[in-house]
Amino acid sequence: MTEAPSDPMLPLLVDSHCHLDFPDFQGQVPDLVTRARAVGVTRMVTICTRLRQEPQVRAIAEAHAGVFYAAGTHPMQAAEEPMATVDQLVALSAHPKFVGIGETGLDYHYTADSAAVQKDSLAVHIEAARQTGLPLIIHSRDADDDMAAILTREHAAGPFSCVMHCYTSGQALARTALDLDFYLSMSGIAAFRRSTELREIFAGAPRDRILVETDAPFLAPPPYRGKRNEPAYVAHTARVGAELFGMSQADFAALTSANFDRLFAKAAGAPAARAAAG
């Protein structure tokens, strides 16, 4: 089981957020990982969105070099799932491949009726991020004002690190997040032709705060838009990111990998991560 790309000249990329346990990928994960490595995506973080499914997500990470995982309760499931506890999340963080808390956050697009429960769940995840030192992975949709207020208040009460995953919100929330030293993650949406305003937000952010991701199986970038996404396709989003920042693809890959290593320091320190970098 090797982690090296098939072409040693390929830029090494990280898919910082995907969902390899979803039914779309059942029985196909080894092939997905192989295809990702073939285009230089040597590391990925697979995200558990319901804590009762954590064992399955953990097993995927354990089975594949270069695959790490995070776990939490997605805000859209917050009203359906048992409330996570800080102790529960802290206990999960003992696993060597557990590298982040979440995804958690607020989603008022379809589930605004559960806003109060979402906020309670978010508070639990924030405290777990503080106690573990692992980065918080935030999902925010149609909740910019509440999200900005909560993150600002909570960070003042006790700092934590954070990535705004699949960032598609407005300029104001981006500025709040960046002022708190958080990171913005670029998904395939940033590569969509009509995402001009979103690309402008990324272009105005410090280069050392940018990550790339797929959110697979969702949000495939062109030329795969409308199809099932997979970790290999992060290379297409990274190509758009490189153009946006006026960088070569190799330099942008190195930049976003270094940013990932800074934020997800536990993954960067893992033996498999060092092997990939070498």
Image (cartoon, helix red, strand yellow):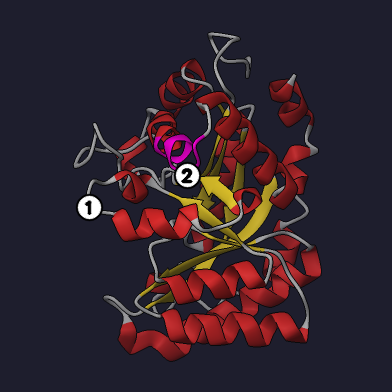
Please identify the residue farthest to the left as the structure is shown.
226
Q: Position of residue 209 (x, y in %)?
A: 62, 54
Q: Which residue is found at the position 74% from the left and 47% from the top?
A: 262
Q: Are marks 2 and 1 in contact (CB under 8 Å)?
A: no
Question: What is the span of residues highlighted in magenta in the rendered image?
Answer: 240-246
Q: Which residue is found at the position 24% from the left and 31% from the top?
A: 223
Q: Which mark is residue 8?
A: none
Q: Position of residue 25 (x, y in %)?
A: 35, 36
> Which quadrant holds residue 111?
bottom left
Task: Answer yes or no: is residue 48 visible.
Answer: no
Q: Which residue is found at the position 70% from the left and 79% from the top?
A: 155
Instruction: Give the residue at mark 2.
Output: 213
Q: Is residue 61 left or right of residue 171?
A: right
Please state which of residues 47 and 189 is positioned toward the viewer in this rendering: 189
Q: Which mark is residue 194?
A: 1
Q: Is residue 101 left or right of residue 269?
A: left
